[in-house]
Image (cartoon, rainbow, N blue to C red):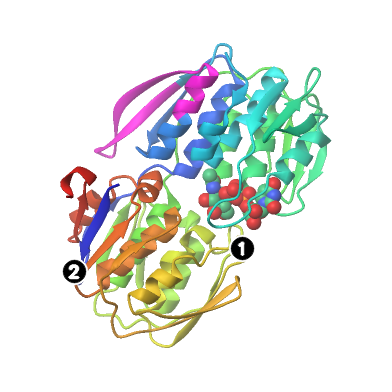
Amino acid sequence: MDKIKIIGGKKLEGKIFISGAKNAALPLICASLLTDETVTLTNMPMLSDIKAMNALMEQLGTQIDEFNDFVDGHPTKTYSYRTPKATSLVAPYDYVRKMRASYYVLGPLLARYGKCELSLPGGCAIGARPMDIHLSSLEQMGASIEIKNGYVNAKIDGRLKGAKITFRTVSVGATCNLLMAATLAEGTTILENSAMEPEIGDLANLLNDMGAKISGIGTPVLTIEGVEKLHGATHKVIADRIEAGSYAVAAAITRGKIELVNAQEPTLSRPLQILRDMGVGIEVKENSIIVDARGKELVGKDIMTEPFPGFPTDLQAQFLVLMLTAKGASMVTETIFENRFMHVPELLRMGANINVHGHASAIVRGVDKLSGAQVMATDLRASFALILAGLIAEGETIVNRVYHLDRGYEKLEEKLKGVGAQIERIKEADEE
Ligand code: UD1
């Protein structure tokens, strides 16, 4: 397996182009299943999770065309999806096992074809992550749901029925799945306590462009008036706020200055406020954000993860590492997932001072230095946190299990090299 080698100590300066958002792209791809016409998505990131979703779509009978494209002079991908009629209504174990977001096919397939068999995703490194909210909400819309041999068998005679659904807890996945399902339902669906993450707004905007009738976008109450048919559309994927936030930390932790081109401030207000409070300079421009920590002494800040517009759990690991370079103690509290401090033991091996209390909080104290080590993480964002630690550690850090990073960070080494990092990928074949 490939590894990433970093020699720490370089101040990062320059510009980084922020790619299209993975977590927006995945449900957008599945939304194309709701119509027999073509849905074209531009500004798509080149990531293994997108390839995995495309493979699942092809297995369902979707025809995909891929084009090389440019956004603001940067190479990106455009994909066109067309599903005249699905040839399979099954999302098999081998696909779902590789990527849990495969469950986004459930809402669209059930709504358009009245049936879907989905392998139940198991837990993952960061938590149990059940699907009960997706399933009970679809039941409220009239679907019959049976779980057998590790699969969800969902069925409906005729169309799903509009319903008033109050989610028991805020869930990004359940909100997206129900939003897609409700577009083709009979009557009106009201989704209360919906997630408000920007990726959901992006999905709702595409669905409306396809002929759906969704109102309340950006609020916790989404109202969807069902329609009989949706049509094709072309849509530009929003910028990846988690990628932007991760590189903002790279600038801050190395006391450098990075312009995050394409990053959108409204999607990042809370993390940017934390950076400002810590002493980092933030300048918001029309199509970019400049993060400037040159010559700054940073102070620790407490953070607590919450659904949007709160602090995102997907930036918790990165900010925790940043707190190691700040004066004083910072308390990091995780409220979304039950097992999201798996990066801490690896950071301790690099000389960090962190005390984890139960599963929910960690006290992080500033340290004079970290030292390079061989490390590995169990999930995507934790892996980036180790990259950040490597950027400031003395000597060489080798981050193993690079496949996690390839799921969510497009051209990671290229982007970091471009701002002055000493980083390279060691291909498996290069090793003896
Ligand atoms: C999405 C993101 C992930 C992010 C997370 C929270 C994608 C592909 N993934 O994951 O990167 O970390 O939002 O912002 O967009 N829950 C239940 N039952 C359910 C559904 C969720 O108990 O049916 C719980 C989860 O276990 C978790 C919490 O609700 O504790 C929030 O999860 P959810 O928002 O659904 O996360 P995902 O959509 O899986």
Residue 227, x across and y down, in percent? 72, 22
In magenta segment, residue 239: no
Is residue 360 shown above or below 70?
A: below
Which of these two is toward me, 350 or 33? 350
Secondary structure of residue under mark 2: loop
Percent of width and height locating residue 260: 32, 55
- Mark 2 is on which residue type? Lys
Q: Please tell me in which quadrant of the rendered image residue 213 appears.
A: top right
Q: Disc 2 marks which residue? A: 10
Between 87 and 202, the residue placed more toward the observer is 87
Quote the CA–CA distance across marks 1 and 2. Answer: 34 Å
> How many numbered tags mark residues here?
2
Residue at 38 percent of width and 52 percent of height: 263
Observer able to see residue 426: yes
Residue 215 placement (x, y as % from top left):
68, 38
> Which residue is nearer to you in this view: 352 or 149?
149
Span of residues in magenta: 54-80
User: Measuring 36% from the left and 67% from the top, which residue is drawn there?
Assistant: 282
Q: Which mark is residue 338?
A: 1
Characterize the local packing of mark 2: few (<14), some (14-19) or many (20 or more) Cα atoms within 10 angstroms: some
- Residue depicted at 60% across the width and 71% down the height: 360
